[in-house]
Image (cartoon, grey):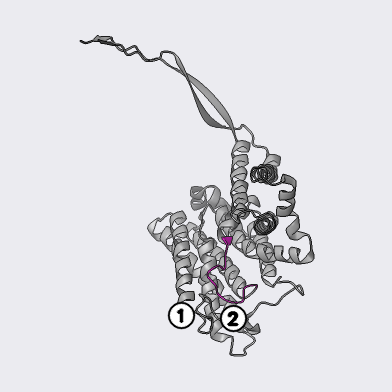
Amino acid sequence: MSLLSQCLQNQWLSSFSLEPRPQESQLLRYLSPVLAIVLTLLSGALIFLWQGQDPLIGLHTFFISPISDSYGLAELGVKAAPMLLCAIGLAICYRANIWNIGAEGQLLMGALVGAWAALQVMDSGSRFSLTFALLAGSFAGLLWALIPAVLRNHFNTNEILTTIMLNYVALNLLLWAVHGPLKDPNGFNFPESALFNDSVTLPIILEDTRLHLGLMFGLLAMVAAWVLLSRTFIGFQLKVIGMDASAGRFAGYKEKKLVYFALLICGALAGLAGVSEVTGPIGQLVPSISPGYGYAAIIVAFLGRLHPVGITLASLLMALVYMGGEMGQIDLGLPLAIGSLFQGMLLFYLLACDVLIGYRVRIKKTVAATAAMPASEGA
């Protein structure tokens, strides 16, 4: 019995590589979010078709119906406000190449401590009760961001890992609080705090809607961030550190202080977003105060090109995606998770467009020749 083995010779093997483009188009760089949105809409139409829905009706239900009246427009502002605050803070971090993934946890800690403060002072009758609650929530978010800042500066710990892990710590602290010390004794055993009274509730800025003062906080943060990043020396230092940390250190910039500054500002804004939610449309502390605003703010920051004005527009779009997911569930019977699917597609297409604008795909072909193995015979 003979066994002959021989490998294929002169086989063509293809490999792909990314090659930087000689000159990157700035126009395409700014149009990248628009292209990502268009591709998301096209993919969404295919998903609706796959689900047995008319694509045009599905897209209309998802993106037009939620804002077809004044109440819907007000709800758009309600959902955009926390993402706007978080994304503005994240943009400051990302400009400095500080990869904070912990806005969700900082938001939850702001909500938790802000709710505790509101419960302590809401019966005092003081006109500063609301201010105290807002400051407490913002400070809690700041302190929560201080942890990864200290770990990065003094222990060389990766802030991506620490911030994302602290999100789960914050969530479990919130769950412990609403099931334990902050649970309403008259709440029929539901995991929620007592309802806040008017002294610790944000004013409504549009009658017969839920639109509250939290949106104004977001708009003020947008203006302040624009001034910080484009008109101040510390904003310039953040950009330099982000582009080349060694050049910044050579110029005498204090990198550790800038890390503290960026992370603490981000934490305070995320904490303000959290306390604005519990003192605004919700009016109490509940486990589900955030459907993932802190995570969605990452997409918002990059979709807005890390520019405060772009982030404001992107937060409105992301708020519309949240509302569209709810509307699709109500009117079309689709799963609520379709909203998260749209968020994921938007981020995927944005990253893909950014890569292909800066790089071009090269296909390299190589020849692999393998010598024949010697024949062997056996009985």
What quarter of the picture does the N terminus occupy?
top left
Q: Amino acid at mark 2?
A: Leu
Q: Is residue 237 visible?
A: no
Q: Secondary structure at mark 1?
A: loop
Q: Please rate how many residues cluster around mark 2, counting C-alpha atoms within 10 Å: few if below 14, some from 14 to 19, many from 20.
A: some
Q: Position of residue 245 (x, y in %)?
A: 50, 50
Decide which of 231, 322 is in the foreground and name it: 322
- Rendered view: 160 above or below 195: above
Q: Is residue 335 visible?
A: yes
Q: Which residue is labeled 2 in the image?
A: 195
Decide which of 181, 258 is in the foreground and name it: 181
Q: Secondary structure at mark 2?
A: loop
Would residue 290 be counted in the magenta stretch? Answer: yes
Label 2 vs 1, first from the N-terminus: 1
Which residues are the magenta region?
A: 281-293
Q: Which residue is labeled 1 in the image?
A: 181
Q: Please rate how many residues cluster around mark 1, counting C-alpha atoms within 10 Å: few if below 14, some from 14 to 19, many from 20.
A: few
- Rendered view: 175 above or below 304: below
- Rendered view: 233 above or below 375: below
At a point 62% along the width and 50% down the height, the residue shown is 342
Q: Position of residue 379 (x, y in %)?
A: 20, 10
At a point 75% along the width and 57% down the height, the residue shown is 65
As drawn, which residue projects farthest toward the left?
379
At a point 75% along the width and 63% down the height, the residue shown is 73
The number of callouts visible is 2
